[in-house]
Amino acid sequence: MTEPLRKPVLVPAGNGRLYEMGRMRAIFKADREETAGRYSISEWWLEPHTRGPGVHAHSDDHIFYVIEGSLSLAVDGRWSTLETGGYALIPGGTRHDFENRGAVRAGFISLNTPAGFEAKMPGIAAALAAEDLRID
């Protein structure tokens, strides 16, 4: 069986499909269209003292890599903090959440495999944009 021919993709810094969610934003760099369904990759940015989407689970694996600040991450009900350079693998079906409890902006790269999570982003972004994500 021959796989579909994929083309190289170059996405300059700051470019991609942007989802604004108030104190949080995501920029999708590649999704199932570019990766033949293998994965999606996105950049996530949280302002200081910003909560995440709430505890949830989905079938795809998440791989998080912190690129700036620190990220508080709940996996199966246990909170941990990952600093810049920290990595997490969250297998599909695992309940998780994230937030920025710090005083500086936090950023992480999210790799989802297989692709498909990105199709939910318009609804997720609209719901989170309507909420106050500030941690008191």
Image (cartoon, rainbow, N blue to C red):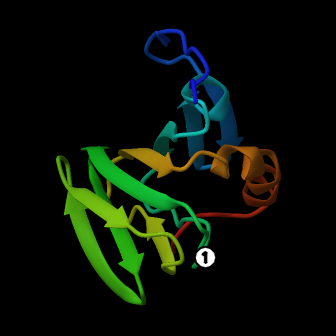
Q: Quadrant of residue 58?
A: bottom right
Residue at point 44% right, 58% down? 62
Residue at point 32% right, 56% down? 103
- Residue 46 at x, y = what percent? 47, 50
Q: Quadrant of the N terminus?
A: top right
- Residue 118 at x, y = what percent? 67, 44
Residue type at the position of mark 1: His
In the displayed structure, 84 sits above or below 37; it is below
Q: Is residue 46 visible?
A: no
Horizontal arrangement in the rendering, residue 51 relative to residue 85 (left or right): right
Residue most toward the bottom?
A: 77
Horizontal arrangement in the rendering, residue 62 relative to residue 38 (left or right): left
Q: Please tell me how crowded label 1 is: few (under 14), some (14-19), or many (20+) other residues with Cα within 10 Å.
A: few
Q: Nearer the viewer, residue 18 or 49?
A: 18
In the displayed structure, 66 sits above or below 92; it is above
Q: Which residue is mark 1?
A: 56
Q: Quadrant of residue 99?
A: bottom left
In the displayed structure, 92 sits above or below 61; it is below
What is the total number of numbered labels drawn onto the structure image?
1
- Residue 81 at x, y = what percent? 25, 69
Residue at point 69% right, 64% down? 132
Q: Nearer the viewer, residue 2 or 36?
A: 2
Quick one: SS at disc 1?
A: loop
